[in-house]
Image (spheres, coloured by chain):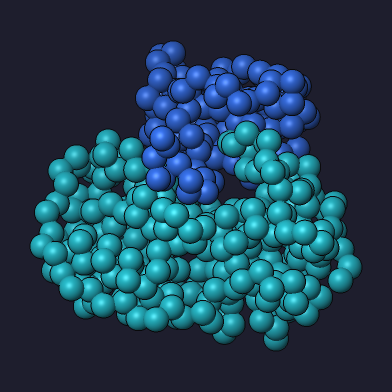
Amino acid sequence: MSRDTALVSADWAEENLETPGLVFVEVDEDTTAYDGGHIPGAIKIDWKKDLQDPVRRDFVNQEQFAALLSERGISNDDTVILYGGNNNWFAAYAYWYFKLYGHEAVKLLDGGRKKWELDARTYTKDVPVREKTSYVAKAPNLEIRAFRDEVVQAIGVKNLVDVRSPDEFAGRLLAPAHLPQEQSQRAGHIPTAISVPWSKAANEDGTFKSDEDLAKIYGEAGLDGSKDTIAYCRIGERSSHTWFVLKELLGHENVKNYDGSWTEYGSLIGVPIALGDEPGKA
Amino acid sequence: MTSPTANVAAGCAAPDQSAPLPSSVDLAKETVITGIVRNADSEAVGGAYVRLLDSSGEFTAEVVSSPEGVFRFFAAPGSWTVKALSRHGNGELAVDAALGVNEIALNVATA
């Protein structure tokens, strides 16, 4: 993968809004933004209602994913262009799902809603009607998803990249600073994890930095290119953003997203936790 | 009976910025930095991207201001910078936050 295959610019998107075979999809946790105005022709996926299992603590399985895409009118041959608010966090999360379930052609809109808004581009409230399809999802590709046991075994062995803010990494905050701080899990980070906040990879307008800048950021932070990598955050969406950078833009081979992330790890009994600004020892 | 989606783990997206503080928020423990984004004509600016930077200038969080221009962060006591980007220009302000509610006025203008 590379920037050319994984990313489209706002200019390109604006010129291709009506190109057949392209489906623009806005993804967010809170879809009121879509309802108030979205990129012309875009449909919506609600990260919480559509992509999470309503009972088990997990995201949608292969059958549920296939049913969702069929119902929204997306076919296996379509090129899906994902974008959203929150600096594309949930769009990147959805991108990871599409890859996990084997969709061939999926891309992120660079800068997402934010760049579109700051450029003062057009929105519409018209909701497109798409005919239902018979989407076939593949079995989940677990080469890009990490589970907790693998994460514990990766301490001191693989690259662990904590992409939360420095204060969450150190244990001074328990959640991103737009959320209340009372949380059930313990504070801190996985020992030996390096701290590279997701925001290091993005410009102020939400677009990704250049490949050259990105390679420098992770190299200087101590990411060892010869090792496998696991990225995590609090619930796995900010780390999807970093997974996208490492795997899809920089082309690193073995990169996994640990979607259980700190809400799971920080609640486990007996696992090691490091406090403070340093990675800590295995 | 609660709705089925009430059981789903909440994501990291920001809640409604204009809603009253939830009753579960304990102001003896939380450091709330809140305010209204206004343009040069003192009109509230909705849809602005408001970000919170820590004392070293590192990004900590970002929210979109509500139609009434309101934003809100849950931080910790200390020095922070609040910065806004919008269609109506940009602006920033340094804040020394203490426990409880810290109200600020954030003005944006074209450079």
- The blue-coloured chain is labelled B
Q: Is residue A273 above or below residue A6?
A: above
**Where, quadrant-wise, is the C terminus of chain A in this rendering?**
bottom right
Is A177 left or right of A250, judged from the image as shown?
Answer: right
Where does residue B74 sit, x and y in percent of width and height?
Answer: 64, 31
| Residue B88: quarter of image | top left
Pick whichever, B78 or A48, lies toward us: A48
Is A49 left or right of B27, judged from the image as shown?
Answer: left
Where does residue B42 sit, x and y in percent of width and height?
Answer: 44, 13
Residue drawn at x 48%, y 48% as measured from the top left: B8
Residue drawn at x 66%, y 81% as measured from the top left: A228
**Where, quadrant-wise, is the N terminus of chain A in this rendering?**
bottom left
The answer to whether residue B39 is seen in the rendering is no
Is A183 left or right of A117, judged from the image as shown?
Answer: right
How many labels, in total?
Answer: 0
Is A30 left or right of A146, judged from the image as shown?
Answer: left
Residue drawn at x 56%, y 63% as measured from the top left: A259
Q: Is residue A125 above or below residue B34?
A: below
Pick whichever, A184 or A118, lies toward us: A184
Q: Residue furthest right?
A: A281
Q: Is residue A72 above or below residue B22?
A: below
Residue drawn at x 16%, y 46% as measured from the top left: A127
Q: Residue furthest top?
A: B42
Pick whichever, A107 or A63, lies toward us: A63
Where does residue A160 sit, x and y in percent of width and height?
Answer: 71, 70
The answer to whether residue A277 is seen in the rendering is yes
Pick whichever, A210 or B8, lies toward us: B8
Q: Is residue B93 above or below residue B6?
A: above
Where does residue A173 sit, x and y in percent of width and height?
Answer: 73, 41
Q: Residue furthest front?
A: B1
- The cyan-coloured chain is labelled A
| Residue A107: quarter of image | bottom left
